[in-house]
Image: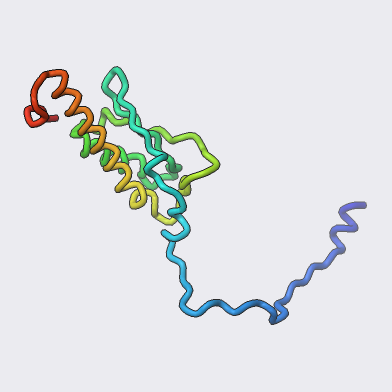
Amino acid sequence: MVYTLAASTLTVAAPLGCDAPAAEGATARRSDVVVTGTDDEMLVLEITRDNKVVVRLPRVEVGQGVTTAVAMMIAEELDARLTDIDIPLAEARTKGNQFTGGSNSVSSLYGPARNLAATARARLVTAAARAGGCPRACCRT
């Protein structure tokens, strides 16, 4: 009975000419939509007791290689082996920039990931220098 009633329904839509005209020259780039939050506060670097570097990725890996790209950025800045970098996917959050699309993941994470790893490296060198009782210049990675 419900199928008979629903199947006999016809829906028609047509423009009435009341739509507002599009603004002249108003264009949106993909990055205007994709980069809605800051990745700086979503990236956290952890160095485990077995010297593995873990950075949870605020994106979805759908075959574009973003986990490998971010791991390479982190390894380069830390002067670490790529095999020592682990990039698991972060848990979903209701706020922030966790959008995956528009080929924007690597470009939007490039600066934040490198800054995060460079800061971690500087802190590690400072801690090693203090522990060794020597200036930072005597320590290298």
Relative height, residue 2 to residue 80 (above, below): below
> Which residue is at the far left?
138
Please report the residue visible at 38 percent of the width from the left and 47 percent of the height from the top.
Answer: 64
Relative height, residue 65 to residue 90 (above, below): below
Q: Position of residue 30 (x, y in %)?
A: 43, 61
Please indicate whether residue 61 sits to the left or right of residue 49 in the image.
right
Please report the residue visible at 45 percent of the width from the left and 42 percent of the height from the top.
Answer: 60
> Which residue is at the far right?
1
Q: In which quarter of the image is the C terminus?
A: top left
Q: Position of residue 107 (x, y in %)?
A: 33, 52
Depth check: 83 or 109 in front?
109
Depth check: 123 or 43 in front?
123
Tell me how the rendering is colored.
rainbow
User: Which image quadrant is residue 122 in?
Assistant: top left
User: Which image quadrant is residue 127 in?
Assistant: top left
Please report the residue visible at 90 percent of the width from the left and 58 percent of the height from the top.
Answer: 5
Please indicate whether residue 75 sits to the left or right of residue 103 in the image.
left
Depth check: 113 or 86 in front?
113
Please report the residue visible at 33 percent of the width from the left and 27 percent of the height from the top.
Answer: 46
Q: Position of residue 16 (x, y in %)?
A: 72, 79
> Which residue is at the far bottom?
17
Q: Position of residue 24 (x, y in %)?
A: 50, 80
